[in-house]
Image: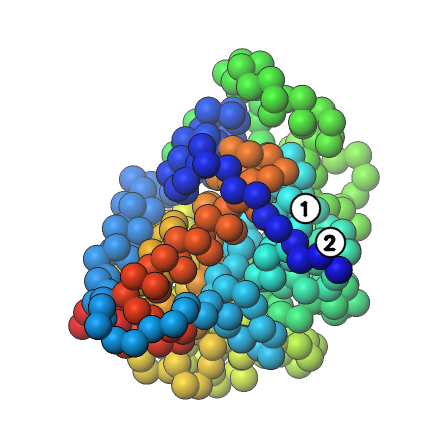
């Protein structure tokens, strides 16, 4: 069997180029849903800025052969130390994008996390990834829905279940409110004009159909109008996670269990006491709390203190190969990126996930070769303390 050979588009040699391509290609309301944060977007900008304050020290005179990016977590060996974060409503930003990104993750042998509120089903993503995709669970109000979602993830072969803890309330996002992307969403005249100005997006949306919450479809009453959909979503999710809910899920789920949204040492200790296998230090990409820390600061403390007790990972603010290197050098065992991959899908369509994964791998390898780091596990040794 011939090895999969990805294609690189030289018009987009950076994530910022992909972001600009996405901005030009999709309606403004879709781009701002992807690109924006909450309130004044302080934490959105701070996440990446403070990651980039981390410095690496090169060792030019040491003997050096090659860079090894292979990383093993939860018993699975991946070709690179990063994966694709869960993102809600992906099909709104680019039609069929969950499948595009899941296919890219499978081809590049990196993990893809499917969100409960995205636009492809657990079963379809499992088919694409041959059961390798992870599943992120928004906690339902009804235990019967929770249990069925967990059973579906198990039946689909998902090796890792990710519990979300950083969305106890809906984030206050001014741009989404202006654009009518509250729940239920509203299509106003301005949005219709934006769609007419993006014919490729409009054509692809017509081709693939209006995006729906495919994971949740079995639990949704038929024929919901938009107002009823908003009520359904509000009633379906209990939002706030707590130790009792996690303990019940730990008893139900026999695979690896990860808590996403951890931002403090106190919550890390609770995760350890509940027998979780890992955490993802995250602030939801700056979409929930504008007055908190950036992700790199708590990550550095948590990894140093608890990294030998569970797998510590991070997302939020990671935008490039050098950012991945900085994150790993700060103690993370793995990094996840959301917006970067969605920019790729929106800018390049079906080839966007593939291009983004290849770009990040290339950038990370260049950093490692430049500083003389032979293995990603050794990146903390190259951090300028």
> What residue sits 45% from the left and 32% below the top?
11
Q: In the rendered view, tell whether residue 1 sits above or below residue 313.
A: above
The count of marks equals: 2
Label 2–label 1 contact, CB within 8 A: yes
Q: In the rendered view, tell whether residue 304 sits above or below residue 124.
A: below
Q: Nearer the viewer, residue 160 or 347?
A: 347
The circle on residue 128 is: 2
> What residue sits 44% from the left and 53% below the top?
362
> Callout 1: 10 Å neighbours few (<14), some, many (20+)?
many
> What residue sits 51% from the left and 70% below the top?
70
Location of residue 265 by image quarter? bottom left
Q: In the rendered view, tell whether residue 165 sits above or below residue 75.
A: above
Instruction: Tell me where residue 135 appears, x and y as whole percent.
Output: 64, 61
> What residue sits 22% from the left and 68% below the top?
60
Label 2, label 1: how far apart the Cα atoms are:
7 Å
Instruction: Tell me where residue 297 appears, x and y as whole percent.
Output: 27, 65
Regarding mark 1 in the picture, which secondary structure is present there? Answer: helix
Q: In the rendered view, tell whether residue 89 sits above or below residue 360.
A: above
Residue 203 appears in the rendering: yes
> Callout 2: 10 Å neighbours few (<14), some, many (20+)?
some
Instruction: Tell me where residue 16 appears, x and y as whole percent.
Output: 37, 38
Instruction: Tell me where residue 111 appears, x and y as whole percent.
Output: 58, 62
227 lies left or right of 357: right
Q: Nearer the viewer, residue 379 or 245?
A: 379
Regarding mark 2 in the picture, which secondary structure is present there? Answer: helix
Residue at the disc numbered 1:
99
The circle on residue 22 is: none
Q: Quadrant of the C terminus?
A: bottom left
Q: Quadrant of the N terminus?
A: bottom right
């Amino acid at each position: 069997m011939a090895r999969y050979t990805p294609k690189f588009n030289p018009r987009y040699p950076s994530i910022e180029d992909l972001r600009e391509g996405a901005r030009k290609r999709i309606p403004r309301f879709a781009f701002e849903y992807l690109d924006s944060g909450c309130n004044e977007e302080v934490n959105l900008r701070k996440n990446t800025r403070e990651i980039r304050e981390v410095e690496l020290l090169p060792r030019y005179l040491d003997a050096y052969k090659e860079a090894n990016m292979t990383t093993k977590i939860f018993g699975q060996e991946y070709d690179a130390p990063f994966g694709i974060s869960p993102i809600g409503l992906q099909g709104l930003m680019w039609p069929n994008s969950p499948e595009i990104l899941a296919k890219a993750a499978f081809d590049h042998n990196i993990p893809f996390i499917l969100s409960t509120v995205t636009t492809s089903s657990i079963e379809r993503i499992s088919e694409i990834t041959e059961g390798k995709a992870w599943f992120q669970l928004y906690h339902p109000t009804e235990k019967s829905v929770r249990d069925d979602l967990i059973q579906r993830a198990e039946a689909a072969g998902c090796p890792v279940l990710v519990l979300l803890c950083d969305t106890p309330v809906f984030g206050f996002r001014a741009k989404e409110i202006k654009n009518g992307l509250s729940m239920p969403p509203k299509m106003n005249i301005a949005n219709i004009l934006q769609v007419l100005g993006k014919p490729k997006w409009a054509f692809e949306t017509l081709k693939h159909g209006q995006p729906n919450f495919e994971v949740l479809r079995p639990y949704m009453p038929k024929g919901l109008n938009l107002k009823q959909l908003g009520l359904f979503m509000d009633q379906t999710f209990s939002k706030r996670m707590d130790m009792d809910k996690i303990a019940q899920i730990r008893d139900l789920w026999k695979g690896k269990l990860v808590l996403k949204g951890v931002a403090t040492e106190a919550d890390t200790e609770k995760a350890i006491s509940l027998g979780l296998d890992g955490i993802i230090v995250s602030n939801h990409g700056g979409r929930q709390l504008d007055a908190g820390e950036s992700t790199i600061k708590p990550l550095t403390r948590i990894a140093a203190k608890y990294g030998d007790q569970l797998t510590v990972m991070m997302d939020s603010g990671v935008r490039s190969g050098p950012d991945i290197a900085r994150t790993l050098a700060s103690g993370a065992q793995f990094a996840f990126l959301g917006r970067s991959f969605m920019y790729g899908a929106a800018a390049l369509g079906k080839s966007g996930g593939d291009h983004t994964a290849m770009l990040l791998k290339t950038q990370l390898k260049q950093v490692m070769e430049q500083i003389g780091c032979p293995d990603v596990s050794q990146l903390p040794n190259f951090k300028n303390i």
